[in-house]
Amino acid sequence: MTTALFTASGISQRYAGRAVLDDIGFVLRPGEMLALLGPSGAGKTTLFRCLAGLQAPDAGRARLDGTDVLALRGRERRRIGLVFQQFNLVGRLSALDNVLAGRLGHVPAWRGMLRMFSREDVALAQHCLDRVGLADHAAQRADTLSGGQQQRVAIARALAQQPDLIIADEPVASLDPGSGTGVLELLKAICHADRVAVICSLHQPDYARRYADRVLGLRAGRIVVDVPAADLAHAQLQALYDDAIMETTQ
């Protein structure tokens, strides 16, 4: 069995005395795509922040190759690529310039501030745009692109980091169904072709079944489902969602 790349163990978080995350633990291997499902308020975004090293949990740890994500610095930090629901692009910059931001952890700080990237970095950024189907839009301002295109630029930026792990926080929530499926197909292809591990939080069980290798179901801050995506059953979804929500997913 492939050695674990990423592990979460005992992750817990409380706000105002209420448990938002309660003893979360799982293992992720290279080339595995994990979908995180759960209703609004289940704790998915808080877990995303803890797994990405953006927030320290009250207890427990997330580790990349055995190193606490909170201790990652510089180039090691760039081993984790982040994709957000709202894209987090600089609208006035071109698609290519936004992708080049993914190289900032690989160049001296002064070069990054002056945007003095090497030919190799520019070529890599262009290649990443080509992989997400936007080579022809490299010079276009990010804020003139469609939502689906902007999310693809965000994925290309993460790719430019040459990460071992991509963590995506509801990357299709702001997109129409057509754009959303395209983004998930892209993440799945990158995961399997590059052996990059992917953690992707979603609201849609059908998307999880179709694109993920494995599903974790989160409810009230606890994992209540952990199965291969192909084995995700109606009864398990009932453990996650209220009946009213379930009616919309059938």
Image (cartoon, rainbow, N blue to C red):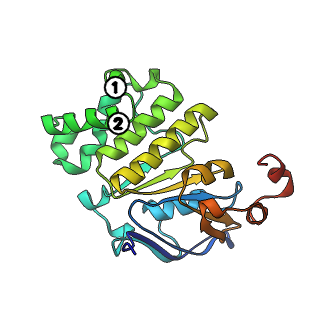
Q: Which residue is mark 1?
A: 94
Does the residue at mark 1 contact the one at mark 2 (Cβ under 8 Å)?
A: no
* Closer to the camera in the image, 44 or 213: 213
* Closer to the camera in the image, 151 or 22: 151
Q: Residue 131 — which label?
A: 2
Viewport quadrant of the N terminus: bottom left
Residue depicted at 36% across the width and 39% down the height = 156
Does 216 sit above or below residue 187? below
Q: Amino acid at mark 1?
A: Ser
Q: Is residue 111 visible?
A: yes
* Closer to the camera in the image, 110 or 169: 169
Q: How many marks?
A: 2
Across and down, in percent, residue 38 comes to 68, 58
Q: Is residue 204 visible?
A: no
- Image side of residue 229 versus residue 96, left or right: right
Q: Earlier in the sequence, mark 1 or mark 2?
A: 1
Secondary structure beneath disc 2? helix
Does 68 sit above or below residue 193? below
C-alpha span from label 1 to label 2: 17 Å
Across and down, in percent, residue 94 comes to 34, 25
- Image side of residue 195 versus residue 115, left or right: right
Does 25 sit above or below residue 126? below
